[in-house]
């Protein structure tokens, strides 16, 4: 029944690897046989043959033996858009040979009951004939027009990487193939006249789900997920119509097959006996060769590249890189090996194939002949990540430890750097390699602790709180993973040796690139100084001006400039430096052409040789003064009395000569203890302090604490676990929460409550917060004196039921001519909405109510307005009357009747004063920040923040990215999706 297999020619079938034999399902009937492996034990073979004969009814040798899946279980629906006009294609003409093949196929489909004649079809498609590798013809239907009218079914397909990983490492495998594939699923009766096609024999429609429909694959995946729901991942893996039964132990395989056969029998799903193989050690699955020892590249795909002739056109190179994409997982530093090909493809000129491309082509073929076996990542175990960077690529390899303490690769990853990425510093490239690996291998990073093995200070670079730019964004993205940074150790696997050697070589090569440093010294009556211009290998230019507070001659200034330039390069980890100077004295004395006689010159020469000896390679380039103008200008600038320097020039003051010896004082350094040290030590080791009272207190307090993932948290009745902070961390947190991005200069007690609600704790929270607020200059200047209300507070029953509105201004003119502020506040949650406007008209008020209140929070019951012409007018009354919103006005002589709006105005004005200082025109740009600060602050009247009352949880603030709380550090995205 191969003519019913409508799988595309390019889609690989699961195939066994090894010797097989045919066995009869019915004794003496050679027409009904199945294939089994020959590498199993005799007992297992007997049991397997018995099992197959016992379940012979799950095999279909003809369409008559295939009843199909019960429509109650699964049926395919097209869900075609009724607004799309049906398309009826005109009949195409075919050659005599193709017409005969079409008629033969139609007769077989009719006999199998997969199609039926159709009258008055809604849609009509033509058939397309595709030649099989055997030379016969395959008939397909062109459903292009129908597919455009059908919405895409977004049912997820399994990740091929995960299926292959979970299949490898098993001792026994069986490959299953469903009879007639998609045809076992019925097409819904209402859609059959849409799936129609025309031939010379007439018009026919499909009764079964045909290949070629837009969502056929999703429907079949939904079916197999339902059928094998209890077995998937345990002893069965399924990808659409590719199925495999796996067993860790050979003796368990018959039982695993029995369970699978019972499932197939239950759902009436039939197998194709000619394409099933049972009881083999290894085989090809989803394009990979899987076995107990691991995952190997498909030999056919490898041979397809090795046998390629030399490319003669751009299309040939595209074909080569396309074939390599399927093998990148097995190829160390694939991007580096293919870089000459990528460079050729990027060129807009005609095709060019030179010696460099040919050498890379031959090297790639040679490498493919010895690809490593990929290991399966064990659940719960740690994985190691080696990283590498070169001028144009970054690469990584994920490694797992084997049982004999060796190492085996899990996945090779590489990435070609584009545009600005090529100008990253070396540390940034190494961090980017980790990020690329985390993105491409997210399932591994989510499920395992990853040890990043590198000799670069990556952990320090991405964990600093003051990290800015791209490293900060990368640090936030990587913070969700469990990463540990370790120094790179010796490699334990020959398969990884090439990657590590290449990585080490390129790291050294990048570090060893030449730095160009131009220096000049200057001495004048106003003072002396030096100018230094450094140019990194990446092309970055740094300008420095050094002012000397000591008297120095011109020659001494020249030496000081040269010595300072070299020291700056050493601080930047430079290995090779070319120093450019216009001082013939310095250049000649260093080369030995001139002799240094004066004692000061002798000292300077010794110092210059001492610092330059720390470099791998150093040379001095003597140039005329006219060619050293930039450094000369900087030195003169430093030696003058000019105070205002260009923003990009860094100024330094040197108080003593570089030849003077530095006095070093040795001081005792004592580490400060933290408040929770005793508690943490007791929980971890059970050790108590020597003092009896302190030990008793520690034992009593420890019940309120818990250590999770290596960090101490405090338990709470109503709050989640609170992260315990050190004295340094608490000081940084208070500063951020009080006057940082989300700070609104809250008082001492509200500030302490905010810190606690965000998930932090230390014993002196309230005292520390009050002390900080008392020292805040802006709070002392602009904070109002808080008095108790004159009357009892009025209760509000529902959130967003009553709003108070007012207009504040005029303010200093902001961008767009905005100088007024429309303010609204919800009486229940204290949520404030505000919008800067240029004019205060009734139309502006109406737009504000519609956009900021009604469309966001629903219709309120009442709005209390200030007694102004913009509010007390017919348009506003008609607008609110249309939605039956009660309109109320405060008394002119009694502002407290709209006290909630007045309080909101006061809060906004106080925040503006504290934030703006002298930049008055920026008030409109700061409004979103001020509103956010207000919404995330605890209100004394409610005891909660407006954000929490509105959304039932506190907002995530920037401080939680630097010091992750438990909800950030251990967020379970998969669990969250399940609950949703």
Image (cartoon, helix red, strand yellow):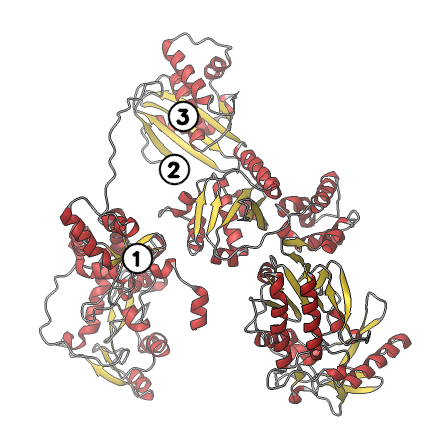
Residue 564 got which mark?
A: 3
Looking at this view, is 843 or 434 the one in front?
Answer: 434
| Residue 564 horizontal/vertical position (percent) | 40, 25
Give the distance between the C-alpha atoms of the residues marked 1 and 3, in whole angstroms: 44 Å
Give the distance between the C-alpha atoms of the residues marked 2 and 3, in whole angstroms: 20 Å
For mark 2, what is the residue?
646
Looking at this view, is 445 or 457 the one in front?
Answer: 445
- The structure residue drawn at horizontal position 90% and vertical position 75%, both measured from the top left corner, is 97
- Crowd band around label 2 with a 10 angstrom C-alpha radius: few (<14), some (14–19), many (20+): few
**Which mark is in front, 2 or 3?**
3
Residue found at the far front of this picture: 43
| Residue 179 horizontal/vertical position (percent) | 72, 76
**Secondary structure found at label 1:** helix
Residue 921 got which mark?
A: 1
**Which mark is in front, 1 or 3?**
3
Q: Is residue 665 left or right of residue 149?
A: left
- Say which quadrant the C terminus sits in: bottom left
Q: Earlier in the sequence, mark 1 or mark 3?
A: 3
Residue found at the far left of this picture: 790
Task: Tell me where residue 823 sits by quadrant.
Answer: bottom left
Task: Tell me where residue 103 sits by quadrant.
Answer: bottom right
Q: Earlier in the sequence, mark 2 or mark 3?
A: 3
- The structure residue drawn at horizontal position 31% and vertical position 83%, both measured from the top left corner, is 875
| Residue 949 horizontal/vertical position (percent) | 28, 72
Task: Tell me where residue 847 sits by quadrant.
Answer: bottom left
Residues tagged 1 and 3 counted as in contact (Cβ below 8 A): no
Q: Is residue 143 visible?
A: yes
């Amino acid at each position: 029944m191969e003519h019913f297999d409508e799988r595309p020619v390019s889609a690989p079938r699961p195939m066994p690897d090894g010797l097989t034999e045919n066995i009869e399902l019915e004794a003496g009937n050679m027409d009904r046989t199945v294939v089994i492996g020959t590498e199993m034990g005799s007992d297992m073979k007997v049991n397997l043959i018995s099992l197959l004969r016992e379940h012979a009814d799950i095999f279909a040798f003809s369409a008559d033996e295939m009843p199909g899946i019960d429509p109650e279980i699964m049926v395919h629906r097209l869900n075609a858009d009724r607004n799309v006009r049906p398309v009826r294609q005109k009949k195409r003409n075919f050659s005599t040979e193709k017409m005969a093949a079409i008629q033969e196929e139609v007769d077989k489909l009719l006999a199998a009951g997969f199609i039926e004649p159709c009258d008055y079809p809604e849609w009509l498609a033509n058939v397309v004939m595709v030649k099989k590798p055997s030379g016969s013809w395959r008939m397909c239907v062109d459903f292009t027009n129908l597919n455009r009218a059908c919405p895409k079914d977004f049912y997820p397909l399994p990740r091929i990487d995960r299926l292959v990983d979970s299949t490898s490492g098993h001792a026994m495998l069986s490959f299953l193939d469903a009879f007639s594939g998609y045809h076992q699923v019925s097409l819904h009766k209402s859609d059959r006249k849409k799936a129609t096609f025309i031939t010379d024999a007439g018009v026919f429609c499909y009764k079964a789900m045909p290949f070629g429909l837009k969502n056929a694959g999703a429907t079949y995946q939904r079916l197999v997920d339902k059928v094998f729901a209890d077995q998937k991942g345990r002893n069965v893996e399924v990808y659409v119509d590719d199925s495999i039964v796996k067993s860790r132990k050979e003796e368990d395989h018959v039982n695993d097959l029995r369970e699978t056969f019972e499932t197939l029998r239950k759902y009436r799903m039939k197998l194709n006996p000619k394409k099933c193989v049972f009881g083999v050690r290894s085989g090809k699955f989803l394009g990979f060769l899987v076995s107990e020892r691991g995952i190997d590249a498909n030999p056919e795909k490898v041979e397809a590249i090795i046998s390629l002739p030399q490319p003669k056109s751009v299309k040939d190179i595209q074909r080569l890189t396309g074939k390599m994409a399927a093998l990148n997982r097995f190829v160390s530093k694939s991007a580096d090996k293919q870089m000459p090909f990528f460079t050729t493809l990027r060129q807009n000129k005609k095709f060019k194939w030179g010696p460099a491309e040919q050498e890379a082509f031959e090297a790639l073929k040679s490498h493919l002949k010895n690809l490593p076996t990929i290991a399966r990542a064990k659940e719960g175990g740690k994985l190691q990540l080696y990283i590498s960077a070169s001028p144009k690529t970054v690469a990584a390899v994920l490694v797992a430890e084997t049982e004999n303490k060796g190492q085996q690769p899990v996945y090779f990853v590489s990435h070609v750097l584009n545009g600005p990425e090529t100008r990253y510093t070396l540390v940034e490239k190494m961090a980017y390699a980790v990020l690329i690996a985390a993105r491409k291998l997210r399932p591994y990073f989510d499920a395992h602790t990853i040890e990043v093995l590198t000799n670069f200070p990556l952990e320090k670079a991405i964990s600093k709180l003051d990290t800015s730019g791209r490293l900060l964004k990368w640090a936030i993205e990587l913070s969700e993973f469990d990463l540990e940074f370790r120094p790179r150790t010796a490699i334990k696997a020959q398969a990884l040796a090439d990657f590590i050697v290449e990585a080490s070589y390129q790291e050294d090569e990048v570090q060893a690139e030449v730095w160009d440093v131009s220096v000049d010294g200057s001495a004048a009556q106003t003072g002396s100084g030096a100018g230094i211009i450094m140019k990194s290998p990446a092309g970055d230019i740094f300008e420095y001006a050094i002012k000397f507070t000591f008297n120095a001659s011109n020659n001494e200034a020249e030496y000081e400039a040269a010595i300072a330039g070299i020291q700056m390069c050493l601080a930047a980890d430079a290995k090779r430096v070319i120093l450019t100077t216009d001082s013939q004295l310095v250049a000649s004395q260093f080369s030995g052409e001139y002799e240094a006689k004066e004692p000061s010159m002798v000292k300077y020469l010794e110092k210059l040789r001492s610092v330059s000896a720390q470099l791998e390679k150093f040379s001095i380039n003597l140039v005329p003064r006219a060619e050293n103008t930039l450094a000369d200008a900087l030195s003169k600038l430093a030696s003058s009395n000019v105070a205002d320097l260009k923003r990009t020039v860094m100024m330094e003051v040197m108080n003593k000569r570089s030849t003077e010896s530095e006095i070093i004082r040795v001081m005792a350094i004592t580490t400060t203890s933290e408040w929770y040290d005793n508690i943490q030590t007791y929980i971890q080791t059970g050790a108590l302090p020597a003092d009896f009272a302190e030990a008793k207190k520690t034992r009593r307090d420890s019940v309120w604490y818990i250590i999770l993932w290596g960090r101490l948290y405090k338990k709470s009745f109503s709050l989640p676990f609170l992260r315990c902070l050190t004295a340094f961390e608490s000081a940084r947190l208070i500063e951020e929460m009080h006057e940082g991005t989300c700070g609104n200069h809250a008082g001492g007690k509200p500030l302490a409550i905010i810190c606690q609600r965000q998930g932090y704790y230390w014993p002196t929270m309230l005292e520390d917060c009050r002390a900080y607020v008392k020292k805040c200059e802006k709070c002392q200047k602009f904070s109002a004196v808080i008095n108790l209300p004159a009357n009892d507070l009025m209760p509000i029953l529902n959130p967003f039921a009553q709003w108070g509105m007012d207009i504040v201004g005029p303010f200093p003119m902001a961008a767009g001519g905005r100088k007024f502020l429309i303010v609204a506040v919800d009486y229940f949650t204290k949520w404030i909405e505000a919008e800067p406007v240029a004019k205060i008209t009734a139309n502006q008020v109406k737009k504000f109510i519609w956009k900021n209140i009604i469309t966001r929070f629903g219709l309120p019951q009442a709005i209390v307005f200030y007694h102004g012409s913009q509010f007390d007018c017919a348009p506003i009354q008609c607008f609110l009357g249309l939605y039956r919103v009660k309109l109320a006005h405060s008394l002119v002589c009694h502002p407290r009747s709209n006290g909630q709006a007045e309080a909101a105005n006061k809060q906004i004005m106080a925040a503006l004063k504290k934030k703006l200082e002298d930049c008055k025109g920026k008030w409109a740009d700061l409004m979103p920040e001020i509103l956010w600060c207000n919404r995330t602050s605890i209100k004394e009247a409610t005891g909660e923040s407006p954000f929490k009352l509105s959304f039932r949880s506190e907002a995530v603030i920037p401080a939680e990215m630097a010091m992750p709380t438990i909800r950030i550090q251990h967020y379970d995205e998969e669990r969250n999706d399940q609950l949703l």
